[in-house]
Image (spheres, helix red, strand yellow):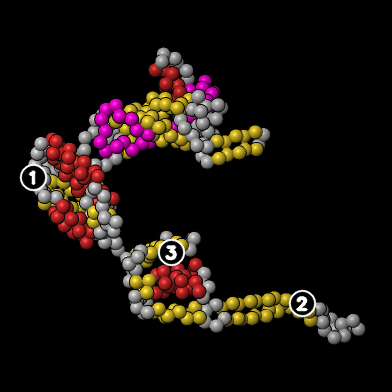
Amino acid sequence: MKKPLLYMALAAVLGASPANSAVRIKDLARFDGVREQPIIGYGLVVGLSGTGDSQRSVATLQSVSNMLREFGLTVPPYAVTSRNVAAVIVTADMPGAVRAGDRFDVNVAALGDARSLAGGTLLMTPLMANNKVAYAMAQGPLAVGGYKFEQRGTSAQKNFPTAGTIPEGAIAERTLAPEVVSNTGALELLLDSPDYTTATRVAAAINSEVAFGTASAVDSGRVRVSLGARDPAATVVMMARIEGIAVDPDLPARVVVNERTGTVVSGGDVYLSAVTITHGDLKVSITERLAVSQPGGIFFGGADGVRTVAAPEATVRVHEDEAQAVSLGTGATIAQLVEALRAIKVSSRDVIAILQGIKRAGALHAELVIQ
């Protein structure tokens, strides 16, 4: 395929929009081999206004001493008394496709007992992956979205001043090219939410939209697309066309409830079988009082050992409101159930208990997730 035709096909793909009732494959899955690389490093932030680490942070004192040694200065750790330095951990997610010299953002968080990183500058810090290889170098002034001021025992704080970011503060030292084409000459799509029906629909949609290439669902979370050629430019166009294809995903029936907040969230395809719910309110009130027992004749020379006694007595009152019933027919939704329960003034916690009871009774045809 010639390059002008490739660019025309790519422009047509980027200009197309999926159907309103469907979701792009780009929002449902990702290509295997394209992923971010987490990297981490240890560094020093300088230029703080007395809000850095104290003498108790031994790691900071040793780090300052080691850094000064690199510049020809020999300062023992115990001689470092400044609180303008803080030890930090620097983290970042390096993009899946990056070339040497590309910049990306980094996050910086205090490691010791520093009170604030506002106004600080991160010194050159190598960022490594889990293989101990440095992939980037970070350096620059911090942007901290908070503050903390203290004066004579009174403090004022907003957000978290011990963490900040450096926009485009890291420079990639290595080029990482994603390997999206396997040894067998195929692309593999990994679904974000594995589902056999969705995987089958994705494969069918690719086969119907793409003239070359054969797609097949390998399992519930993977779709393999065979390529007819190894041309890198043709592969990029193929990937762009696949990402723009619209598919109707099949969502599992699921109801999520949060016991702390009483929130109930359900999908649109959750239905109930015929069920009757009876809800009553039982109130028990116990009142305790002291009853004084006064024997007769105690003031007129009664027998020895006769005395006044205070005996506790309790009154128990039980009040049970009239039970209220809610009946729902087959095919009712969770929204109709919640609306019916709200009509009889059922609390959020009672709604969760009722949903659990309906699930045990077998009338709720969905997965019940309790957070």
> How many numbered badges does the structure rendering display?
3
> What's the residue at 26%, 38% (across, down)?
96
Residue at x-position 62% and y-position 38%: 155
Query: In front here: 125 or 332?
Result: 332
Quarter where residue 103 is shown? top left
Which sits earlier in the primary sequence, circle 3 or circle 2?
3
Q: Which structural element holds mark 3?
A: strand
Q: Which of 207 and 166 is in front in this view?
A: 207
Residue labelled with disc 1: 228
Q: Which numbered disc covers residue 264?
A: 3
Does the magenta run of residues contain 104? Answer: yes
Lower position in the chain sequence, tag 1 or tag 3: 1
Instruction: Check the picture and name the quadrant holding the C terminus.
Output: bottom left
Q: Which residue is drawn at 38% across and 29% down?
A: 169
x%, y% of residue 346?
51, 72
Residue at the outermost top position:
72
For the residues labelled 2 and 1, the Cα–Cα distance comes to 97 Å
Q: Name the residue under label 2.
A: 310
Rate crowding at label 1 as few (under 14), some (14 to 19) or many (20 or more) other CA atoms within 10 Å.
Answer: few
